[in-house]
Structure formats: C-alpha cells, structure tokens
Image (spheres, rainbow, N blue to C red):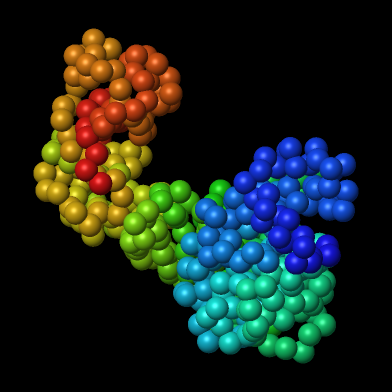
Amino acid sequence: MIWTDELREFILLHRNDDPLQLVLQQKKYPQWDMKFVAQQVEGYRMATDKIPSLAAYSDFVYPPKLNREQCSSEITATFKGTEFATNKNIADITGGLGIDSIFMAKHAKSLVYVEQNEELYTIASHNFKAIHQDNITPYCGNGIDFLQSTDRYFDLLYIDPARRDDNGKKVSAFENCTPNILENMNLLLGKADKLLIKSSPMLDILLATKQLQHIEEIIILAVKNECKEVLFLCSKNSEIPNKKYTCININSNGSVDKIVFDRNHENELSIPYTSTIHNYIYDPNVALLKGGAFKTLSQLYDIPKLHRNTHLYTSDKRITDFPGRIFKVIKDMPLSAKEIATAIPDGKAHVVTRNYPTPSEQLQKKLKLKEGGNLFVIALTKSDNSKTIILCEREK
C-alpha cells in the first residue's frame, strides 16, 4: 500500500460512488488500483456506523471486507478501554485492524500492538499515525512468539483469538481458536498481571469456565439488545470459587443496564413461579439471558417467573428500571386465528415465542398476522405447563 495525498483526494472525490462501478473503471483510471479504491469506499461506509469517530479521519485506511467485519465496534472497544485500560501498560497480541488497540490506548499509558498479517500490520501502523495515537508501538509477528521473546511484563494482556478454522468455518470453543488459549495459559499469565480474553457471543460460558484457570470475572456485553462479546478477565493471583458475572446492555440512547451476580449464589436461590398473567410482562435483555441471571432477577425486582424455562416475569407493578423490555398486557387469550383477527383488526403485530412448541415464524403464519404495528403477541408456557397467548403493547 502506497498512500499519497493524491490517492486520498481521489478516494474522497469518489466516496459516494458505487464500489462495483469503481472496480469496472480500472482502464479509465490506470494510475490507481481501483479494487483498493472500492475497498476504501466500502470501508468508509461501514465505518460511519461501526467506528464513526475514526471515519472522520480522511487518512484512515480500511482493510478487506472480512477484516472489517471481524473488528470490534467503537461502542464495545470504548467499553474495554474505559473499563480495563486506564493507566495500564498493555499488549494486544492479536491486533487485527487495531480498533481495540486504538480505544484502549486512549486510556492506557502504553500499548504494544502485535499482528502477524503483514497487510493488516501495515494498515494499522499507518492508521495509528493518521489519528495521532502516539502511545502505540506496532510489532509484526505472531503474538505467542512475541511473548516468548520479549523481556517486557505488562499490566494487561488482551487477546481476541481467530474464530475460524482452516476452511474458513466459524468456531467458538477456545480449543478450536487460534492461538489456542488453553495450551498457552501459563505463558499468558506469566507475562502480565491480568489477561482479558474476547470470545464469541456463541461461546458455551459454563464449559469455558471449567476450561479456563484463574477467572476473576465474566462480562457479557450487549449493544441495543444484541449480544456482541463475552469477555473473560483472568489473573494468575485469582482463585475465586464464586465466578462473578457482569451482564451489560448498552441501550440505543447510550444508557447502560448493568447487573452483577455470582453463579453459586444464583444456583442456591429459590424463587416464586406463577401461572397468573398480571398487568405487566418483563423480558430480560440478551446479556442477562446469556449470563443466566434468572433467579437473581426475580429476587432483585421481587417479581415471579412464569416458568422455569420461560424466561419472562410478570407483575401488577410497573418497574421502570427493569433491564429489558416491558409489555403492558391487554388480553390473555386462546390460540385462535378468529380471536386474534377480532383483537387485531389491521392484522399487524410482532410475534414472540418463549418456551413454546411452535416457532414464532410459523405461529405468525398460523395466526395470519403480518410483521409490524405497535402490538405484540407473546406465546408462552406457564408454570402449570399450560400454553397461552398474551396480547401486549410495548412500553419500554
């Protein structure tokens, strides 16, 4: 990659063009690599949504599509920077595009970025200079090799192992990722006070906690009710039997729902169940569902659960700070297309199923409903194992 002022100006001039058409104009612009130009146009459009503060830099260079898709968003990278990087000396040993490195470095004393892919290393090194992030030291090489060869000791190691096999298929288990964290745990914990591991939102957390040593905290991070990352904070000095879970959902307005619990306490709790549908139904956010804080939620908000496997709660009181969706119950009704047609004359509603034998898409067709409108149809199993459909409107 040879980045010049002329190339930058050309890309800025064509930023609103169709990337495919740009590739087809190679003969018209023989002085430029038009595939690279199209890559920059596509990357900028992605960045305006995913990493908006970096998209503002006209010298910022974007890698190929797969690398852009795999990089962290600005929201999640900022969270890691503010929560874990303040005044720390850090090594990011699987640097990738460098987004996590950039936002951790904003809060850190220093950061070593390590990336073995030469193209990504070159792009990231350019970008660190383009945004004037001067406390990052880039290193081209394998992260494990770097740790084995360096004499440095860090406050924090950050690792985001590659989650694709040799055939490009997605994987989530630690033993299938690259590098293999389980095989290198002694090395990782021997080079830093703490180790922060980013894993797939599809990861089996309970299995991972059995495999990993020295876990201090498991962080389930969701953005706008979509689970983005599961993070494991480890320390060589930590032998905590009760695993701390932190479930975080960053809402569209920037507010944060945060619930902290420990697994042993969750398992020991006994909570009330009910088959009565009250005025409100409460649907926990995905971070809480992923973390499994089902009994903790019932205790914290003093609300009964509708069934052990129906992860919904109900109450006559309106809990304004509940970490999830709140529905106002309109009617508890039988499963009947005729009843539904009477209750929803325009035929539009969002269909949700919880612990129910029919998937939501099939139920929507069966009830002859179209997606849309302000109403919700929630099909569920109650604690007495009876099935019901609740007509609701969403309040939060």
Image mark count: 0
Q: Is residue 19 above or below residue 119?
A: above
Q: Is residue 379 above or below residue 94?
A: above
Judge left or right: residue 362 versus residue 327.
right
Residue farthest along the top direction in this orientation? 338
Residue 307, image x and y in percent? Answer: 28, 39
Question: Could you tell me which quadrant the N terminus lies in?
Answer: bottom right
Of 362 and 343, nearer the camera is 343
Q: Residue at x 66, y 56 (%)?
A: 12
Residue 88, image x and y in percent? Answer: 56, 85
Quadrant of the rendered image containing residue 210? bottom right
Residue 61, image x and y in percent? Answer: 70, 62
Of 112 and 126, nearer the camera is 126
Of 200 and 25, nearer the camera is 25
Determine if residue 234 is in view: no
Q: Residue at x 80, y 38 (%)?
A: 24
Quadrant of the rendered image containing residue 299? bottom left
Q: Residue at x 80, y 48 (%)?
A: 34
Determine if residue 223 is in view: yes
Judge left or right: residue 250 versus residue 189.
left
Residue farthest along the left direction in this orientation? 316
Q: Is residue 262 above or below residue 21?
A: below
Residue 245, image x and y in percent? Answer: 42, 64
Q: Is residue 295 above or below residue 383?
A: below
Quadrant of the rendered image containing residue 103? bottom right
Q: Residue at x 34, y 57 (%)?
A: 253
